[in-house]
Amino acid sequence: GAGVSQSPSNKVTEKGKDVELRCDPISGHTALYWYRQSLGQGLEFLIYFQGNSAPDKSGLPSDRFSAERTGGSVSTLTIQRTQQEDSAVYLCASSLSQGLGTEAFFGQGTRLTVV
Amino acid sequence: AQSVAQPEDQVNVAEGNPLTVKCTYSVSGNPYLFWYVQYPNRGLQFLLKYITGDNLVKGSYGFEAEFNKSQTSFHLKKPSALVSDSALYFCAVRDGGSGYSTLTFGKGTMLLVSP
């Protein structure tokens, strides 16, 4: 597609349920990032995938969070046993390479609300 | 560790006046610097970047940014603000010294341009 696509755009879930958020990066982009945006908190790095390398999971806030990237393309972020503090906008981005000067392109985000 | 600071939560400017949104950074090596803009309920859009070369970088929508190595700053500027420039602006950095490819973002600055 023309840009990074995320689904769903909005998700309301009950506390304790599991959720899956999907990201479809720009075709040909080898790097993929997940960030979380909470009100007044800026963008919090979660996880980074680059090609076939092991992902950088250093930003995942707890073991309830996990992500995978199948076939070097689509990525799924899974949050198990959701808590109210997980409510945020989850943003996915991709970039053409892992080059330091390469800009990342963002999707529209998934707004997650845990009730 | 790489970090970015945006010292102003909000900047107010009248339409037609010049605007500046401030950003300072901390890295161990050469900085790779980026500005993004976020309109309401939208993902982040890339504005401009500094990799090397001229300290004044020009980007989208008439924006430019000035890299100052001695002050470790990368302030975003525009000679004449428009009401439509009102949005949330993020500065981001990668550290060339670490080779780390994840973008670290500041907390964002809300720009409000009044008619």
Image: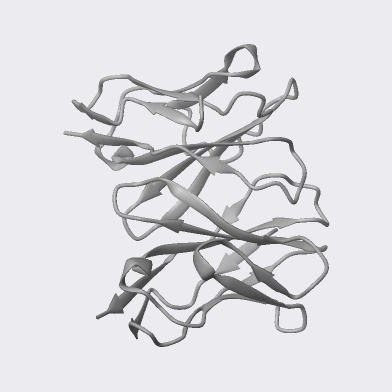
Q: Residue at x 39, y 39 (%)?
A: A108
Q: Residue at x 30, y 42 (%)?
A: A85
Name the outermost residue toward the top. A71
Residue A97 located left or right of residue B111 = right
Q: Position of residue B75 (x, y in %)?
A: 59, 76
Kindly tell me whether residue A37 is visible in this rendering.
yes
Of residue A75 and residue B75, the one placed in the foreground of this image is B75
Q: Residue at x 47, y 34 (%)?
A: A62
Q: Position of residue B6 (x, y in %)?
A: 51, 72
Check the image and report above or below for A89 versus A49. Answer: below
Q: Residue at x 26, y 20 (%)?
A: A17
Kindly tell me whether residue B107 is visible in this rendering.
no
Residue B94 located left or right of residue A59 = right
Count of marks placed on residues:
0
Colour pattern of the rendering: one colour
Q: Position of residue A87 (x, y in %)?
A: 28, 40
Check the image and report above or below for A5 versus B114. Answer: above
Of residue B13 and residue A17, the one placed in the foreground of this image is B13
Of residue A35 and residue A66, the one placed in the foreground of this image is A35
Task: Residue B65: name its quadrant.
Answer: bottom right
Of residue B42 and residue B92, the one placed in the foreground of this image is B42
Q: Quadrant of the C terminus of chain A?
A: top left
Q: Position of residue B30 (x, y in %)?
A: 81, 63
